[in-house]
Image: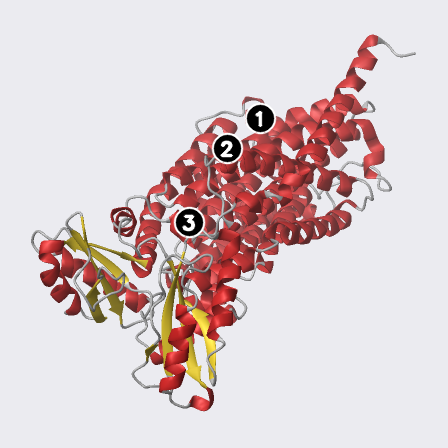
Amino acid sequence: MFSFASVARWTVPVLLLLTWLGIGGTLGPYAGKLGEVATNDQAAFLPQNAESTQVIEAGKDFRRQETLPAIVVWTASSDARITTGQRQAATAALASLDGTPGTAGKASPALPSADGRALQGVVPLRPDLGEQLPDALERIRTAAETVPGTTARIAGPAASQADLSDAFAGIDGLLLVVALVTVLVILLLVYRSLLLPFVVILGAVFALGLACAVVYALADRDVVRVDGQVQGILSILVIGAATDYALLLTARFREELTRHADRFTAMRAALRRSSGPITASAATVALGLLALLLSDLTNNRALGPVGAIGIVCAVLSTLTFLPAVLVLLGRSAYWPAKPKPADGHGVWGRVAALVDRAPRKVWAVTLAALLACAAFAPTLDSRGVPLDEIFVNDAPSVAAQATLAEHFPGGSGNPAVVLTDADRLPQVRQAAEGTEGVSSAAPLTASGRPGGGAPLVVDGRARIDVTLAAPADSDAAKDTVARLREAVHAVPGADALVGGYTAQQYDTQQTSERDRMLIVPVVLAIILVILIGLLRSLVMPVLLIATVALNFLATLGVSALVFQGVFGFSGTDASVPLYGFVFLVALGVDYNIFLMSRVREESLAHGTRQGVLRGLTATGGVITSAGVVLAATFAALGVVPLAFMVQIAFIVAFGVLLDTLVVRSLLVPALVVDIGRKAWWPGRLSRAEAGEDTGAAAPGRGA
């Protein structure tokens, strides 16, 4: 016979379960709809205050300023020279595109290369085509292929943007499947249970559906911006975080079931002892991500709130859906395995014994190894990657750009844009032409093309298109832009501004470097405050932050060697180190929070030394499993054929494993054992003071 209290305590988990089933059924589809409000137009993610952004705003009245150029390049078959007939046919093909859907003005005539073996023409497209861009490029390709005896390719920003969109096509579904299958396999191996892994996965999927629905609503109202990178990272972050938090809670519930016959009592104890570490861990990640709002790059600022929303949804699912299901299932959740207390004689008992036996030797050896890896961190080049390295696989735009650069000046069809006061136009043009690395400079005319007529003047301003000698995406071109700015800024009264594609890349790189200088200390300060509040100590939080920072530097060092020696990358995108730092430091502190919150709990009863050893033994398996799961989910980003995603995937996956297996398992425990009770200064472990350092046996050796 059920009492009212009995009915009530069963009612709450049932209602929570029904609520989440409703959320999953209603909002789950949004996990596949986020691409509808995503944009891969890189112009939307420029630094707000950069000079290149000012050029876009100031030059809106110039006809070609708001266009997305598609550069058509023809090469003669068998490396022959281009004939007059072929040039005429190419010009006619370009002219036939005028007024077709997606174009934003007249195409240029076909111009021959200096070696006479290639032609090029520019078709201006609207920058807001979105999903219609591939159709517009296909029309251009169809027209270009009518020129007999030639091979036609399309290069330029329009082609690059189309390939970028193609790389992200289906990212939500592909990433979700790869990540979920990976996590499911790992959980089946970890739990040796048939039911619990599916419960954990279901909670992660519900959290992702809720997060995507919230982000969709905000992006649809232009509150946040989402691109393919942010979209992919959100999926991985939510699945990885939700699974990690679930591992901690389910492990603690299993432990409490060995102490309490009543499942409700066991769950209350599990929540009481794990909700603090889970919430604190989530706060470090969410607030660390929100620190990206300080960035001047729009895509960085977008990742901040989007990622934080994902973390909040992951925590909400872990602390409501998961407890409800676990209470309803009870011990059957772990079937066919049975909950049993840890005996301290497994692998983590042996690790604890090693730390106890020679703590100073353990931390000295691991510290030396990490410092050796970190020594290579300065060799990681983060000045950006050339176009031919952006895509992991072969991309049509890359091959076309290589062909263009072979026959024309590297910056052909993608000029630097100089805006100047019209009365200073001759002096600014002369300064531009005299800049090292500039191939030519011509003012934009009333016809909408550089040269060949009177300069176009709008509100007293004129525009000069500057063709660079080096490819527009190269380091040499960026260096030329810096020199060009210095030259034109020196013209008195010109108020000259330099923009265009290369200037945008240069400004993005410079802004990323400034962002790192600002955001890194802010993230460290946020995490320090959270750790002080959780551990009630000053020494321990500083120690933990120092170790995860060292782990980050060691990861960058290893990444520098792997990227150059294995993957063949000459460098990374400018934002990769910042993303890596935010994820690795915030997520790395997670595992130390899980460990040290348990160590503090054990230290209150047994002293610091025994607290460390008991905490390491109790949490070693679950934290390592969580690290493997998170590393595997981030590694799933490698399925996206972009260097940026592959680099982030490697840095986070390797860094998490290094942190889990070395820093949290060996370095931190050994340091705390060696430091002793002073590690908790200025706090006091009052119940443990009398029993501190008594020489009691470590777990695995009779404890």
Residue identifier under label 2: 677
Question: Is 380 above or below relative to 658?
Answer: below
Q: Where, by quadrant of the figure, is residue 290 drawn?
A: top left
Q: Looking at the rendering, in which quadrant would you find the C terminus?
A: top right
User: Which of the pair 491/566 is nearer the observer?
Assistant: 491
The image position of residue 663, as x and y in percent, is 54, 49
Provide residue 281's location: percent of width, then percent of height.
Answer: 55, 35
- Residue type at numbered disc 2: Arg
Tell me if label 1 and label 3 are in contact, CB under 8 Å: no
Look at mark 1 in the image and give the residue it sits on.
688
- Residue 692 visible, this angle: yes
| Three-letter amino acid code at the position of disc 1 | Ala
Measured Cα–Cα span from mark 2 to mark 1: 9 Å
Residue linked to disc 3: 578
> Circle 1 — which element?
helix
| Relative to 484, residue 30 above or below | above
Sequence-earlier tag: 1 or 3 = 3
Q: Residue at x 11, y 53 (%)?
A: 494
Residue at 16%, 54% in the rendered image: 420
Q: Position of residue 528 (x, y in %)?
A: 43, 34
Disc 3 on helix, strand or loop? helix
Q: Amino acid at mark 3?
A: Leu
- Image spot of residue 469 (x, y percent): 27, 73
The answer, for residue 599, to whether it is visible in the render is: no
State whether residue 178 is above or below residue 247: below
Mark 3 neighbour class, 10 Å CA radius: few under 14, some 14 to 19, many 20 or more: some
Disc 1 crowd, CA 10 A, few/some/many (<14, 14-19, 20+): some
Residue that protrudes farthest toward the right in the picture: 1
